[in-house]
Amino acid sequence: MKKLIGGAAVLGGLAVLAVAATALATPSSGFSTEQLSLGRFGEIDAKVETDSYELELKTKGDSDVYVVRNTVVPGGQSGWHYHPGPSLITVVQGTATFYDADDPTCTPRVFPTGTGVIDDAVEASHAHLLRNEGTGNLVTVTTQIVPAGASRRIDAPDPGNCNF
């Protein structure tokens, strides 16, 4: 009986933490996402190698692969968040400005139209925020590979390192 009560207490504590994390999450503003596709893949073991190019992609377990289009209006932002798997982001229009939760100097990483960035921040301590600091809309197309059934985005609290 003590184990049952202890287990219930632990589950209750986890529920409180989940609610608190949601309450502390930083909401997006001027940011919209359109899901273009979602595919469930079994284990992936792909390898391509030529004289000048090499690619390896390997997963253990099933994966969900999303393709999404994000549109961010001028002054808009994604809110602090991270993902349970890597994201391959292509800047289609505008300039994407990323800030990292674990950067005490809050130094922006800037990516103009036609460039790509790999986001492999899979822990809350490596959360990030995407801002549109330009005068026109920012549009990105992103491919995300996450464990099957996992949320593709996990909101995170403001780390307090950036003053915006």
Image (spheres, rainbow, N blue to C red):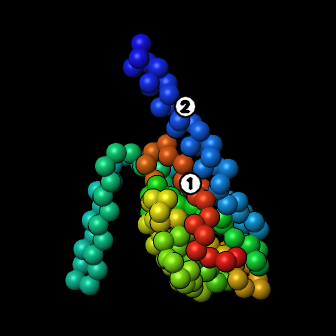
* Residue projecting furthest to the top: 1
Look at 53% across and 70% down and name the residue there. Answer: 101
Quarter of the image with the N terminus in it: top left
Query: Which mark's residue is nearer the viewer, 1 or 2?
Result: 2
Secondary structure beneath label 1:
strand
Look at 44% across and 60% down and name the residue there. Answer: 122
Give residue 154's mark. Answer: 1
Q: Which amino acid type is marked by label 1?
A: Ile
Query: With respect to residue 11, does 45 lie above or below?
Result: below
* x, y percent for residue 116: 51, 79
CB under 8 Å between discs 1 and 2: no
For the residues marked 1 and 2, what is the alpha-carbon distance in whole angstroms? 20 Å
The one of 63 and 86 positioned closer to us in this rendering: 86
Secondary structure beneath label 2:
helix
Query: With respect to residue 145, does 77 lie above or below?
Result: below
- Residue at numbered disc 2: 12
